[in-house]
Image (cartoon, rainbow, N blue to C red):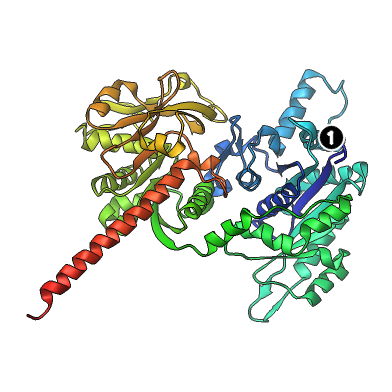
C-alpha cells in the first residue's frame, strides 16, 4: 500500500442510535480481512472530557481501555470486530479539544491571537484524527465516526473539520459515508425517503457530499427506491446500501459484503485487493443464529431498564454462547425488585447468575440476596467488580457469620468492612479518571477454576474501581472455604475469589467482558456459560427422573 493513509468519515442523520458504530466497525472488519491495516476512532461532540462521570442512563456503558482511558461504548464495537486493543487517541470529545486549546491559550501559545472555532478548534480536531495515521504503527485507512446527528449544533465543528480534510487530502484519499433512516410507514404501507433527502441536504449545505449511503430500514428497500434516493441525493445507485435490521450485529459485515460495500470502497481508493477472509466469521454467525442449546442467565443489577449500560456483557455472552453452541437468553432482574419479591420467585428458572459492576448503595441488598440463593442452590455464578464485592459480603455474612459485614463504600461506621477503600484512593476527591483504571497483571492459583479457564498462571485484565477486599479478613474468608484464586503480583490486592465446593462460583474485581471477542470468547465467560449448559442438562435430567418416578407411582396397579 502507499505511505499515505486514506480517511473514511462516517456521519449519521435523521435520528440517533442508527448504529454508526456497528457500521464503522463492520466496514473496518471487511477492509482488515482484505489485508489492510485499519484504525477506527470516535469523535464525540459532548463537552465532557470523557464519559467516565456520565450517568449510564444518559450515555450507556463506559468502555475502559488497556491504558485506563474511559471511552464511548462504540470503541467496544471497534475492539470486538477488529480484535484490536485501542488507546485514548481513538476517542476524541469536544471537552478534550477545548481543554487542550484553553490550556494552550493560558500558556500564551497563541501569542495573543483571538482563539476561534475556525481555525483553532477545527485544526485541533484534524490533528487528533491525523495523529492516528502513524500511532503507534502506520495504517492504510482511518475510519472516523462522528457522534451525534447531522443538524446538531454541537457537532458542527467536527463536520467542518472533516469537510476541510476532504478538501485538503483530496477525493482520492477521503470518503464520506452517511448512515440514514428510511422509515417504513405501517399505515401507508410504504417507505419514505424524505428524511434521508433532508439529512443529505443538511450535509451538502455545510459542504459535504456523501459518497455512500447506508440506509437503515426495517426490511430491504427495493431497487426502484434506491434509484430514487440516488437521484435526489446525488449518490450512485450501487452506493445506496441496504442496512436492514438483522438478528445479530455480527451479520452486518456479511450483509455489507454481499452488496459489494467493501468493493466500492476499494475502487474509490484504487486498491486491488483479494476478497475478505471470512471463513471464521461466517460459521460464527451461523452458530449465533442456529444454536443447539438454550440457557437462561439472570443478570441482577440496577440499570436493567437500559441494556446499553451492560453492552459488553451482552456481547460477551453471545461470544461464549458460540463456543458452547448455545443461545444465552438474558433474564434481566432488578436488584431492587429482588429485595422485595425474593430470590425464589425471580431466579427459580435460571441456569446461571451474573452480578455486574456498578456504583452506589441502591440495589446492593438485592444483589447479596441473589448471590446467597445461587450459592446455596449450587447454580453457576459469575461476579464482576461490585459483583465480586457483593459475593464477599454475602460469604462473610452467611458463611463466616459476620452479620453486619458490608462495604466501606456505603457505610463508614462499620464493625466489619470486608470491602474497603484502596490505599491509593485515600484523599482522592475528584471523580473523573481517578479510579484504578486499565490493565493490571494478576497471578492465578493453580488448580482453580480461573486457572483452568485461562490455561496460564499470569493474566492481564482491565479494572475500574476504588474499593477492594479488605486484607484484614483474608484469613477468616480462607478458613471458611473461600479461595482467593487471583491476586496482584505483589499479593496486595485480591483479584478473583472462588468457592471450590460449588459447581462454578467465580467473582472477579476486574471487567472480563471488556476483552471478549466474537471469535475469541473471554475464558471466564466461556467457562461460565459452559457450566450453565451443564447445570441445565443435569437439572433437566433430574427433573425428568423425578417426573418419571411420580408417573410410575401414580400409575394404576
Residue 2's x, y, as percent? 88, 39
Residue placed most toward the observer, 370 or 532: 532
* Residue 375 falls left or right of residue 360: left
Judge whether residue 508 can be spotted in this image.
no
Quadrant position of residue 434:
top right
Q: Secondary structure at mark 1?
A: helix
Residue placed most toward the observer, 34 or 296: 34
Name the image quarter holding the N terminus.
top right
Residue at the image position 84 percent from the left and 73 percent from the top: 227
Outermost residue on the left side: it is 557
Residue 208's x, y, as percent? 86, 53
Residue 530 vertical placement versus 401 (above, below): below
Residue placed most toward the observer, 276 or 87: 276
Quadrant position of residue 107:
top right
Number of dots carrying numbers: 1
Residue at the image position 29 percent from the left and 37 percent from the top: 500
Residue at the image position 69 percent from the left and 63 percent from the top: 255
Residue 92's x, y, as percent? 71, 38
* Residue 451 falls left or right of residue 499: right
Name the image quarter holding the C terminus.
bottom left
Q: Which residue is mark 1?
A: 123
* Residue 550 falls left or right of residue 338: left
Callout 1 environment at 10 Å: few (<14), some (14 to 19), or many (20+)? some
Residue 352 vertical placement versus 164 (above, below): below
Residue at the image position 66 percent from the left and 33 percent from the top: 88
Judge whether residue 70 can be spotted in this image.
yes
Amino acid at each position: 500500500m502507499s505511505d499515505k493513509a486514506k480517511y473514511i468519515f462516517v456521519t449519521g442523520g435523521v435520528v440517533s442510535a442508527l448504529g454508526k458504530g456497528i457500521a464503522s466497525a463492520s466496514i473496518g472488519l471487511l477492509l482488515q480481512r482484505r489485508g489492510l491495516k485499519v484504525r477506527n476512532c470516535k469523535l464525540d461532540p459532548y463537552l465532557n472530557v470523557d464519559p467516565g462521570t456520565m450517568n449510564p442512563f444518559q450515555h450507556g456503558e463506559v468502555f475502559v481501555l488497556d491504558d485506563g482511558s474511559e471511552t464511548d461504548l462504540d470503541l467496544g464495537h471497534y475492539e470486538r470486530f477488529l480484535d484490536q486493543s485501542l488507546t485514548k487517541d481513538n476517542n476524541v470529545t469536544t471537552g478534550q479539544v477545548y481543554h487542550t486549546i484553553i490550556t494552550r491559550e493560558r500558556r500564551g501559545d497563541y501569542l495573543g491571537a483571538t482563539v476561534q472555532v475556525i481555525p483553532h478548534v477545527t485544526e485541533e480536531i484534524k490533528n487528533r484524527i491525523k495523529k492516528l495515521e502513524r500511532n503507534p504503527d502506520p495504517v492504510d485507512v482511518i475510519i472516523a465516526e462522528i457522534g451525534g446527528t447531522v443538524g446538531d449544533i454541537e457537532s458542527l465543528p467536527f463536520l467542518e473539520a472533516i469537510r476541510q480534510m476532504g478538501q485538503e487530502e483530496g477525493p482520492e484519499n477521503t470518503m464520506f459515508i452517511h448512515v440514514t433512516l428510511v422509515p417504513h410507514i405501517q399505515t401507508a404501507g410504504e417507505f419514505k425517503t424524505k428524511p434521508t433527502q433532508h439529512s443529505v441536504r443538511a450535509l451538502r449545505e455545510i459542504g459535504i457530499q456523501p459518497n455512500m449511503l447506508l440506509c437503515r430500514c426495517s426490511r430491504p428497500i427495493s431497487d426502484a427506491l434506491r434509484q430514487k434516493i440516488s437521484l435526489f441525493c446525488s449518490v450512485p445507485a450501487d452506493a445506496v446500501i441496504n442496512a436492514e435490521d438483522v438478528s445479530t450485529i455480527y451479520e452486518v459485515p456479511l450483509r455489507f459484503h454481499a452488496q459489494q460495500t467493501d468493493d466500492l470502497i476499494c475502487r474509490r481508493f484504487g486498491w486491488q485487493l483479494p476478497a475478505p477472509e471470512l471463513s471464521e466469521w461466517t460459521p460464527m454467525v451461523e452458530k449465533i443464529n442456529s444454536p443447539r442449546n438454550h440457557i437462561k442467565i439472570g443478570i441482577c443489577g440496577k440499570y436493567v431498564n437500559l441494556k446499553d449500560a451492560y453492552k459488553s456483557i451482552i456481547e460477551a455472552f453471545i461470544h461464549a454462547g458460540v463456543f458452547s453452541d448455545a443461545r444465552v437468553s438474558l433474564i434481566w432482574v432488578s436488584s431492587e425488585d429482588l429485595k422485595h419479591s425474593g430470590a425464589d420467585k425471580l431466579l427459580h428458572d435460571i441456569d446461571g447468575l451474573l452480578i455486574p459492576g456498578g456504583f452506589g448503595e441502591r440495589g446492593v441488598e438485592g444483589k447479596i440476596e441473589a448471590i446467597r440463593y445461587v450459592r446455596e442452590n449450587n447454580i453457576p455464578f459469575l461476579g464482576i467488580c461490585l459483583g465480586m464485592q457483593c459475593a464477599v459480603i454475602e460469604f462473610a455474612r452467611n458463611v463466616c457469620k459476620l452479620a453486619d459485614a458490608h462495604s466501606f463504600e456505603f457505610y463508614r461506621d462499620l464493625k466489619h468492612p470486608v470491602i474497603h477503600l484502596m490505599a491509593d484512593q485515600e484523599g482522592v476527591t475528584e471523580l473523573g479518571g481517578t479510579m484504578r483504571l486499565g490493565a493490571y497483571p494478576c497471578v492465578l492459583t493453580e488448580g482453580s477454576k480461573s486457572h483452568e479457564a485461562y490455561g496460564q498462571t499470569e493474566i492481564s485484565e482491565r479494572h475500574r474501581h476504588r474499593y477492594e477486599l479488605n486484607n484484614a479478613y483474608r484469613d477468616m474468608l480462607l478458613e471458611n472455604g473461600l479461595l482467593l484464586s487471583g491476586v496482584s503480583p505483589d499479593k496486595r490486592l485480591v483479584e478473583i475469589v472462588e468457592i471450590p465446593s460449588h459447581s462454578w462460583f467465580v467473582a472477579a474485581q476486574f471487567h472480563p467482558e471488556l476483552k471478549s471477542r466474537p471469535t475469541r470468547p473471554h475464558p471466564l465467560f466461556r467457562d461460565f456459560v459452559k457450566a450453565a449448559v451443564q447445570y441445565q442438562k443435569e437439572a433437566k435430567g433430574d427433573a425428568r427422573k423425578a417426573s418419571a418416578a411420580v408417573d410410575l407411582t401414580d400409575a394404576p396397579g
